[in-house]
């Protein structure tokens, strides 16, 4: 008889909250066993089936694998990415676990409501961060009658304070943070003095954390790392100077921006154009001889030719251009992961793992739902769009059975907007950590 591993303390805490009140926000680090915790709850809840699990497309196969380990007797139907008619048939036939991605759910939301799922699990719940997004509205409206609910994410918020609202409302139907997003905003935020949206009111993150403590289970990296046995990553910033052509293009954008009267760091199209230039891209054209790519190729030539490497980019031409340059100059096997792929992420990773010394060039938006612990090198050719993307990207490598310390390299263009972006992402992570810690009562204890 196979011995079932014991639950960790944070898993026990989460299952106790869920068992007591029927729903729970599980804000645990990647690799901390959120899926195992959900299956423990399914064993404890009364009449938990049928159960609907929504996740990102890359993560759907994981739920089938987890079910075979922790509840092998239940039926599992994966209807993510199939035709609408097959999705509807799968939902209707589901008596155990029905798994699909958020986009597939939105297309058959009425059918999901009619099926009357007893339990709803939102994996990668940052997908419903924006209260005004169509997917978020569909989840909140069509799945609100489920008897049991669980939200899974590393942080209670994806990028800013207002992103806390929708996942918590899904859990408690607005009892703690307000019945509407407008009431939440007027209670915890203030208008930006320059008219650019809203800002958190002073102390709002602590107040929100205290309000949702009783329905949230939180665990930090430093709390779980000893149990996982994975050493902390080592992070290094490499400052590079732009090429002459990049300097010319960048200065022109900066000049045009100043003429139009916009704040340099205010975001928008010019902001993206400046980031594209420092990444080696001008509009849809990518320069494979730019300093960042040259440094990356030089690094690959210096590494042991058996070491696998993961490189993160932002823009599509940058992703393809970096992959082509690495393939041509380093002679290493190269695989690309970006939006609109014909192959699944699982198929790409299987090929990457099967080739020693291979390089995975991954567009920044594809950071969720896969593992790459075979590599200990994580290189950011461009800074990601949010602190959550950066965090997930690093944790793709930094999880069991990884036994080596992951080396994280940030390739940053000196005297550009990029160092400010890097600093802003670090500040964003600090804020999100604070929200998480208040929700778990960790800051109060300290």
Image: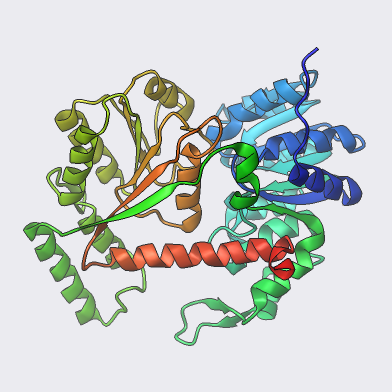
Name the residue rendered at 75%, 40% in the picture.
8
Q: Position of residue 72 (x, y in %)?
A: 76, 19
- Dividing the picture into quadrants, the one containing residue 183 is bottom right
Name the residue rendered at 79%, 38% in the picture.
114
Above or below 355: residue 317: below
Above or below 6: residue 218: below
- The number of callouts visible is 0
Q: Position of residue 149 (x, y in %)?
A: 79, 46
Choose between 385 and 111: the one closer to the eye.
385
- Dividing the picture into quadrants, the one containing residue 239 is bottom left
Q: Position of residue 393 (x, y in %)?
A: 45, 45
Q: Position of residue 125 (x, y in %)?
A: 63, 49
Choose between 150 and 191: the one closer to the eye.
150
Q: Quadrant of the C terminus?
A: bottom right
Q: Quadrant of the N terminus?
A: top right
Choose between 438 and 232: the one closer to the eye.
232
Above or below 324: residue 232: below
């Amino acid at each position: 008889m196979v011995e079932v591993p014991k639950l960790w303390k944070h898993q026990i805490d989460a299952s106790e909250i869920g068992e007591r009140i029927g729903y729970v926000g599980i804000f645990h680090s990647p690799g901390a066993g959120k899926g195992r915790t959900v299956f423990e709850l399914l064993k404890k809840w009364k009449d938990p089936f049928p159960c609907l699990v929504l996740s990102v497309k890359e993560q759907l196969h994981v739920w089938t694998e987890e079910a075979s380990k922790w509840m092998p007797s239940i039926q599992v139907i994966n209807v993510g990415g199939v035709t609408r008619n097959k999705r509807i048939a799968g939902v209707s036939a589901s008596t155990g676990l029905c798994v699909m991605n958020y986009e597939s759910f939105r297309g058959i939301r009425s059918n999901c409501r009619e099926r009357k799922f007893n339990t709803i699990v939102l994996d990668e719940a940052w997908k419903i961060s924006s209260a005004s997004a169509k997917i978020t509205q569909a989840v909140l409206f069509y799945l609100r009658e489920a008897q049991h609910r669980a939200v899974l994410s590393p942080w209670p918020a994806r990028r800013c304070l207002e992103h806390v609202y929708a996942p918590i409302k899904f859990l408690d139907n607005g009892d703690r943070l307000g019945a509407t997003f407008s009431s939440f905003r007027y209670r915890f935020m203030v208008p930006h003095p320059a008219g650019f949206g809203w800002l958190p009111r002073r102390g709002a993150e602590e107040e929100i954390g205290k309000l949702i403590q009783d329905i949230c289970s939180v665990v930090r990296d430093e709390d779980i790392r000893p149990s996982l046995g994975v050493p902390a990553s080592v992070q290094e910033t490499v400052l590079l100077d732009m090429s002459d052509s990049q300097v010319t293009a960048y200065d022109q954008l900066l000049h045009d921006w100043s003429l139009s009267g916009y704040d340099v760091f205010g975001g928008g199209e010019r902001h993206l154009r400046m980031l594209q230039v420092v990444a080696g891209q001008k509009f849809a054209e990518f320069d494979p001889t730019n300093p960042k790519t040259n440094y990356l190729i030089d690094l690959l030539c210096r590494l042991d030719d058996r070491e696998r490497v993961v490189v993160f980019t932002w823009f599509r031409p940058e992703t393809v251009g970096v992959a082509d340059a690495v393939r041509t100059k380093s002679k290493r096997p190269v695989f690309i992961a970006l939006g609109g792929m014909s192959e699944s992420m699982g198929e790409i990773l299987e090929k990457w793992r099967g080739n020693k010394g291979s390089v995975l060039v991954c567009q920044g938006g594809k950071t969720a739902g896969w593992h790459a612990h075979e590599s200990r090198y994580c290189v950011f050719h461009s800074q990601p769009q949010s602190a959550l993307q950066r965090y997930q990207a690093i944790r793709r490598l930094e999880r069991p059975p990884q036994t080596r310390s992951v080396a994280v390299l940030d390739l940053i263009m000196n005297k550009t907007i990029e160092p400010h972006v890097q600093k802003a992402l670090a500040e964003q992570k600090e804020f999100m950590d604070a929200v998480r810690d208040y929700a778990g009562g960790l800051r109060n204890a300290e």
